[in-house]
Amino acid sequence: RVVAEVKSFGEGSDREIEGFFNQLIAQVLDVYPPDALEAPVKRVQDVVASSTAPPDSPIKFRILTNLFNALPRTSPLRLPVAESLIALADDDLDVLQLSRPQVEKWLAEWDIPLETKSAFLKKVADGVAKAGQKDAAYSYLLDRLRLIPASSPEAEAATLETISAALSIPSVHDFDTLAKVDAVQSAKDHPLFALLKIFMLDGVKEYLVWAEANAAVLEQYSLQNPVLEHKIRLLTLASLAAQNVGRDLPYSEIVDALQIDESKVEVWVIDVIRAGLLSGKLSQPTKTLLVTRSTTRSFARTEWETLEKRLATWKTGLLGVLDVVAAARAAAGKDVSAGAALEAAAPAAVAQAA
């Protein structure tokens, strides 16, 4: 009955209001059995949401945080409280100090259906994206997609949203992880799925053909062509470099693969190095790039074959080194034996001469 009588924060300082609600929450948890907590907990949330507070006052956060922490760790009622906190934070999620491991722990603890977990991750992703944390938002979208069966009615829409996020974020270069999620197959007939495959396996030429034929798709999913062109050139150069590790890669091959002027080659190489996709050394006199390391976009049969060839070459080189070392040791052994024989013979020769 006390809970029903509470209409707003009422009069008092933040400290007094927080103290009152702490007592109210404690009473609710003490009086109501676990299976009857939903209504009074929701009532507290509604009162907090409808009450007015100064813009700079943290009172709403503090009351909801106290409510969240007071509930049992495994209680599914923690979820709507967490959603209220996210909505309250708006574009200032830093105040919640939300982290991905923390969210994963919550979902593991709460006794809620997969569909509910998926919906919560979507809300977290939206909140994080609104706060400008695009990379973190993509991680939550990916976690959400992993929870959705490929046969689910929401699988295709969730897949397309995640693909769009992955493509649009400049720092995301790994598409193999996304492609391996089961739900992605639900969108296999969609143009965005074809675009995802291009970013995984193909290059600039294939992208330009796709972009020309699918301008409406780019607009529909708010994908910016300059951003995608820049990313596909980085990935194309990284893949080309991966095929030439330990070799000098001519500028002419880079020009052809990236479809750029030769004067832009060094700029693009520096961009790829800054993105962490390759390491190497440019040579202006020879117009080559010595590749020392490069990242592959996926690890399929072709990459295994390349790795096998490199290991075979490394093995051959190592065997050659071992042969040289063995020969050197053998030669050193002969020299030592000959020296010892001479030292042993010298005293006898001196005695005989005397």
Image (cartoon, grey):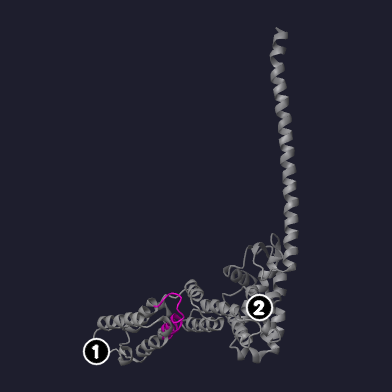
The numbered mark at residue 88 is: none
Using a 10 Å C-alpha cutoff, classify the residue at mark 2 as few (fewer than 14 neighbours), some (14 to 19) or many (20 or more).
Answer: some
Q: Earlier in the sequence, mark 2 or mark 1?
A: 1
Residue at image x 69%, y 79%? 198
Q: In the visual, does 350 lie left or right of 226? A: right
**Residue at the spot of label 2:** 182
- Which residue type carries mark 1? Glu
- Which residue type carries mark 2? Asp
**Residue at the spot of label 1:** 11
Residue 46: horizontal and vertical position, in percent?
Answer: 38, 90
User: Is 343 located above or below residue 159 in the figure?
Assistant: above
Residue 301: horizontal and vertical position, in percent?
Answer: 75, 68
Residue 257: horizontal and vertical position, in percent?
Answer: 71, 74
Q: Nearer the viewer, residue 80 or 293?
A: 80
Residue 168: horizontal and vertical position, in percent?
Answer: 58, 81
Magenta run includes residue 275: no
Using a 10 Å C-alpha cutoff, classify the residue at mark 1 as few (fewer than 14 neighbours), some (14 to 19) or many (20 or more).
Answer: few
Residues drawn in magenta? 71-87
Q: SS at mark 1?
A: loop
User: Is 353 located above or below residue 328 in the figure?
Assistant: above
Task: Specify the quadrant of the image occupied by residue 22.
Answer: bottom left
Residue at image x 69%, y 68%? 299
Task: Specify the quadrant of the image occupied by residue 67.
Answer: bottom left
Q: Quadrant of the C terminus?
A: top right
Q: Quadrant of the N terminus?
A: bottom left
Q: Nearer the viewer, residue 28 or 330?
A: 28
User: Is 201 located above or below residue 213 in the figure?
Assistant: above
Q: Nearer the viewer, residue 68 or 131?
A: 68
Distance CA(mark 2)–CA(mark 1): 54 Å
